[in-house]
Amino acid sequence: MTYWMQTFTGRKIDLLAPKPEDVDIEDIAHALSMICRFNGHCRDFYSVAEHSMLVEMLSGADFGNLPRSLEGPSRYDGTEVRLCGLLHDAAEAYVGDLCTPVKRSLVHLEGLPAVPSLSRGTPFDDLEDRWLRAIGQRFDLGSSLASTNEIVKESDDKALAIEVVALFSPVLMDWWTSRERPCPGDATIQCWPPAEARRRFVHRFRQLTMARGEKAPWHEIGGPP
């Protein structure tokens, strides 16, 4: 049985067997701009697309602060780290967004041992990883997305702290048991409407792609992949 869905650009894709040619940056940008973070429980609509751009910005800053000896292989440069930051949640464009508490609860529901961080090992995790691998292949990132590096993980957690302060009132103390409070001025949350978040996401993707000196892996809506 094929579990298919239609994307924003009109593609018919098999959710369980993603292929690189199924992936389109317009589909990703549109879907992420329409998905609200925190299961919609934040003060204003705040899209996964805007969150992704915040993580990308923080990833670039964190990479720039690394000693040169810790930056890894020469190909894994700052631009690639930024692109991984921008696309770290791109699989959610196809499988949807499950917030962290829901992901953790799936481990308990399936009778598996709990883990303190994001659970890896549920069917949902497997599906998400399949899409991250396909997206990574599509945009010449190899396995970088499916095995997100520590810079992006740290930037994702920093982004969460910034978002919590900006988007919740009151802010529960439980948020600070495993992360640092953000410093004033770390970043500004704009809460862009979907159309603006989508436009900015695609624009930033194109900038990063061109900075890598590659042929742009996107096309206009309705054009060939």
Image (spheres, rainbow, N blue to C red):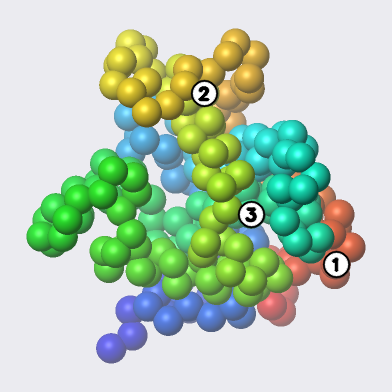
Which mark is drawn over residue 89? none
Q: How many marks?
A: 3
Precedes in sequence: disc 1 or disc 2: 2
What's the distance in space between the residues labelled 1 and 2, CA to CA?
33 Å
Q: Amino acid at mark 1?
A: Glu
Which mark is drawn over residue 84? 3
Residue on which disc 1 sits: 214
Image quadrant in which you'd find residue 54 = top right
Residue 30 position, x and y percent, is 56, 53
Precedes in sequence: disc 3 or disc 1: 3
- Name the residue: 28% across, 43% down: 116
From the viewer's perspective, is the residue at label 3 or at label 1 nearer? 3
Q: Quadrant of the N terminus?
A: bottom left
Element carrying mark 2 = helix
Residue on which disc 2 sits: 162
Residue 159 makes an appearance in the image: yes
Image quadrant in which you'd find residue 113 = bottom left
Residue in front for this viewpoint, 130 or 96: 130
Precedes in sequence: disc 2 or disc 3: 3
Residue 63 position, x and y percent, is 72, 41
Q: Are marks 3 and 1 in contact (CB under 8 Å)?
A: no
Residue 91 position, x and y percent, is 48, 60
Residue in front for this viewpoint, 128 or 77: 77
